[in-house]
Image (tube, helix red, strand yellow):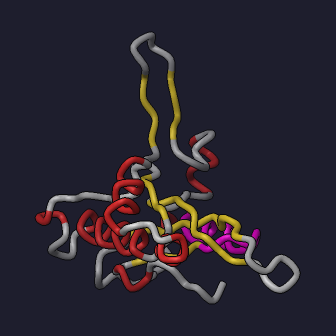
Amino acid sequence: MNKWAIKWGVPYEALEDLRCQFGMVQTEPEAHLSGDSEAAVQTRIRMEASRKGCRLWRNNIGATLDDRGNFIRYGLCNDSKQMSSKIKSSDLIGIKPVTITPDMVGTVIGQFLAREVKVGDWKYTGTPREKAQLKFIELVNGLGGDAAFASSEVDVVDNTR
């Protein structure tokens, strides 16, 4: 977006205002940026994704009763308890811009982006939950998306996919 603004002579302040108007600037309190909690790591990942031109949103998953007593499931891959036990969608879901080449040079598409956030020193151990999370990551990547486990803002975007 910055290259476009420079090309058309759009002042930086106007571009930032436009980003704010469309909710593209994430403003999180500084307290949420420090530490190695999953919430802190997630905040840093979302901010770094935004700096790289990507957008990531929370994908809360669960079930509840609404005010009329209806049971409602929410979040991706949470159609049933059975499904949720076999495949678990990532904490963060979003989109990243990708320029297509060579026959569609200059065309930008949005690639599905997912990150399963873990604390900074996390290592995969193959628990049933991790296996279900990995299954979602493999599904997204197998269909051309970009999904991965992420334990720091360094893991935000792999521009080689």
Any magenta on residue 142? yes
**Can you say which quadrant of the picture contains the C terminus?**
bottom right
- In the rendered image, the residue lying farthest to the front is 9
User: Which image quarter: residue 141?
Assistant: bottom right
Percent position (x, y) of residue 5? 48, 70
Q: Which residue is drawn at the image coordinates 55% and 57% (left, top)?
A: 88
* Residue 28 shown left or right of residue 79 in the figure: left
Q: Which residues are magenta?
A: 133-146
* Residue 97 shown left or right of residue 36 in the figure: right
**Viewer-closest of 148 and 125:** 148
**Viewer-closest of 151 and 56:** 56
* Residue 116 shown left or right of residue 146 in the figure: left
- In the rendered image, the residue lying farthest to the right is 103
Vertical comparison of 45 with 32: above or below? below
- In the rendered image, the residue lying farthest to the bottom is 160
User: Which image quarter: residue 154?
Assistant: bottom left
Percent position (x, y) of residue 110? 66, 64
Any magenta on residue 108? no
Q: How many marks?
A: 0
Vertical comparison of 85 with 144: above or below? above
Q: Which residue is drawn at the image coordinates 52% and 44% (left, top)?
A: 75
Chief secondary structure of the magenta portion: helix
Q: Which residue is drawn at the image coordinates 54% and 66% (left, top)?
A: 114
Q: Which residue is drawn at the image coordinates 57% and 44% (left, top)?
A: 78
**Viewer-closest of 48 and 14:** 14
- In the rendered image, the residue lying farthest to the top is 68
* Residue 78 shown left or right of residue 20 in the figure: right
Percent position (x, y) of residue 109? 70, 67
